[in-house]
């Protein structure tokens, strides 16, 4: 009885083998979408160092949207709270550190590069294969903002990504 049922089932599905192909094809697409979603998410509960160590080069992506004024504004608040403005100026125009609001980028302006620069500092960043592409008027190393002499405890992964969102928002052509 059961065997017969299975037999009928197989026979029927054979008849619909094109549906089977379609089904396999659709599941493949679904797996791809899920996989892509997972690989591009930053785990905000990890520390900046854990993110830097565990994410392959080029793969740290920004979950926030620089085009969203709310996201950008909250990033600027964190920027001021963590004293980046001491070197880069309150509006990112530069000072002891280079400007963040101009179009010249020392190492690059993608989220991955900026996240590693802020976390590791410029010297450690270069040791890890990120090269200097341009020179700003200020030529000094940037200390790691997440360790060393100036441990900024509050500089969590989420807060660094928020600051980056604000920096990137300065470069959206309005
Ligand atoms: C002690 C001064 C100092 C502080 C504090 C500081 N920076 Fe920097 N920053 C620098 C210097 C100097 C450079 C240039 C590094 C180089 O040329 O290698 C730099 C470079 C940068 C760049 C790259 C700029 C470009 O044009 O490519 C970014 C982005 C940046 N800093 C963000 C931050 C953020 C965000 C903070 C706060 C969490 C911060 N900095 C705190 C001194 C500082």
Image (cartoon, rainbow, N blue to C red):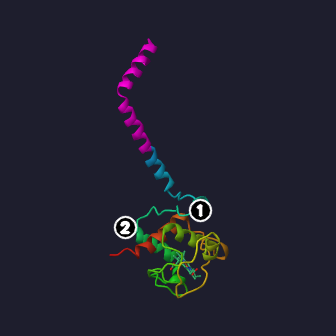
Residue 169 visible within the image: yes
Work out whether mark 1 precedes mark 2 in sequence or the reverse, and give the earlier one: 1
> Residue 71's quadrant in the figure?
bottom left
Circle 2 — which element?
A: loop
**Quadrant of the rendering where the N terminus is positioned:** top left
Above/below status of 37 relative to 69? above
Main SS of the magenta segment? helix
Looking at the rendering, the quadrant in which ligand 1 lies is bottom right
The numbered dot on residue 47 is 1
Residue at 44% x, 18% y is: 6
* Residue 25 on image: x %, y %: 40, 40
Residue at 45% x, 74% y is: 167
**Label 1: how many residues lie within 10 Å, few (<14), some (14-19) or many (20+)?**
some
User: On the image, numbered disc 2 is attached to which residue?
Assistant: 68
Q: Is mark 2 within 8 Å of ligand 1?
A: no
> Residue 122's quadrant in the figure?
bottom right
* Residue 109 on image: x %, y %: 48, 73
Circle 1 — which element?
A: loop
**Quadrant of the rendering where the C terminus is positioned:** bottom left
The one nearer the camera, 161 or 15, is 15
Q: Which residues are magenta?
A: 1-30
Q: Is residue 105 left or right of residue 52?
A: left
């Amino acid at each position: 009885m059961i065997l017969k049922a299975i037999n009928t089932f197989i026979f029927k599905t054979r008849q619909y083998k094109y549906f089977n192909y379609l089904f396999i094809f659709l599941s493949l697409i679904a797996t791809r979408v899920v996989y892509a979603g997972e690989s591009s998410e930053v785990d905000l509960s990890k520390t900046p160092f854990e993110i830097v160590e565990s994410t392959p080069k080029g793969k740290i992506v920004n979950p926030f949207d620089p085009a969203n004024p709310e996201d950008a504004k909250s990033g600027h608040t964190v920027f001021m709270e963590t004293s980046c403005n001491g070197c880069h100026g309150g509006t990112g125009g530069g000072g002891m550190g280079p400007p963040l609001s101009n179009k010249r980028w020392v190492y690059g302006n993608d989220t991955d590069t900026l996240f590693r620069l802020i976390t590791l500092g410029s010297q450690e960043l270069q040791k890890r294969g990120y090269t200097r592409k341009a020179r700003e008027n200020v030529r000094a190393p940037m200390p790691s903002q997440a360790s060393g002499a100036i441990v900024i405890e509050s500089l969590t992964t989420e807060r660094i990504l928020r600051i980056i969102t604000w920096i990137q928002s300065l470069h959206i052509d309005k």
